[in-house]
Amino acid sequence: MNTAIAVLAKKSASLAFVVLLLLGAQPALAQDEEAIGPAGPFYVPLQPAFVLNYGGQGRLKYLRAEISVRVDSIHVANSVRHHLPYIRNNLVMLFSRQTEEEINSLDGRETMRKKALEEVRRILLKEDKTKKGVEDLFFTNFVVQK
């Protein structure tokens, strides 16, 4: 019986050694991949969806927009996630200043999208000195209630 336990212990030790080797190799591979960086672009959803009033005085009007930002690296994606509260605040302020005409026209929405993109870039430049990396901003869902 003692021999069986000794054999089992040796096999367990060998198995544990193999597992440790495999686990030890994983972080090295991950670090190498991070140094090179996986191929982009990456899409960062600005969640939850933006739900806000717009259009100034009078009857309340609502806007619900889902937005994603396209970035070129994991570093920039992490920076967007890190500054998400600041980005969301400034985008809410930007969208709530829009008039009904701007929100309901295609040209107005495109102008608003470009302003939102510039705002995200401005925040990352100010906070992380990230000059490049935010490639585009997309409305993935856009609903207006008048």
Image: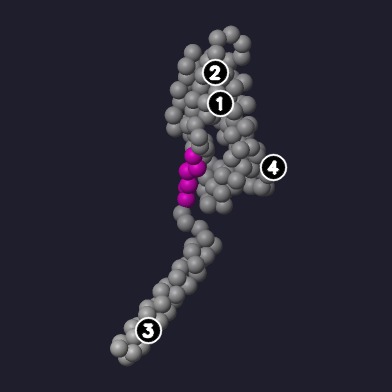
In the rendered view, does 114 fall on the left or right side of 19? right
Among numbered discs 3 and 2, the one appearing first in the sequence: 3
* Relative height, residue 88 to residue 132 (above, below): above
Quarter of the image for residue 54 reads: top right
Among numbered discs 4 and 1, the one appearing first in the sequence: 1
Check the image and name the residue furthest to the front: 1
- In the rendered structure, find residue 102 and report the number of the disc placed on it: 2
> At x 50% / y 58%, what residue is drawn?
37
Compare residues 3 and 37 and report the one nearer the observer.
3
Magenta stretch: helix, strand or loop mostly: strand
Check the image and name the residue furthest to the right: 126
Residues in magenta? 40-45
Q: Are marks 1 and 3 in contact (CB under 8 Å)?
A: no
Q: Are marks 4 and 2 in contact (CB under 8 Å)?
A: no
Question: Residue 72, image x and y in percent?
Answer: 52, 48
Q: Which residue is mark 1?
A: 112
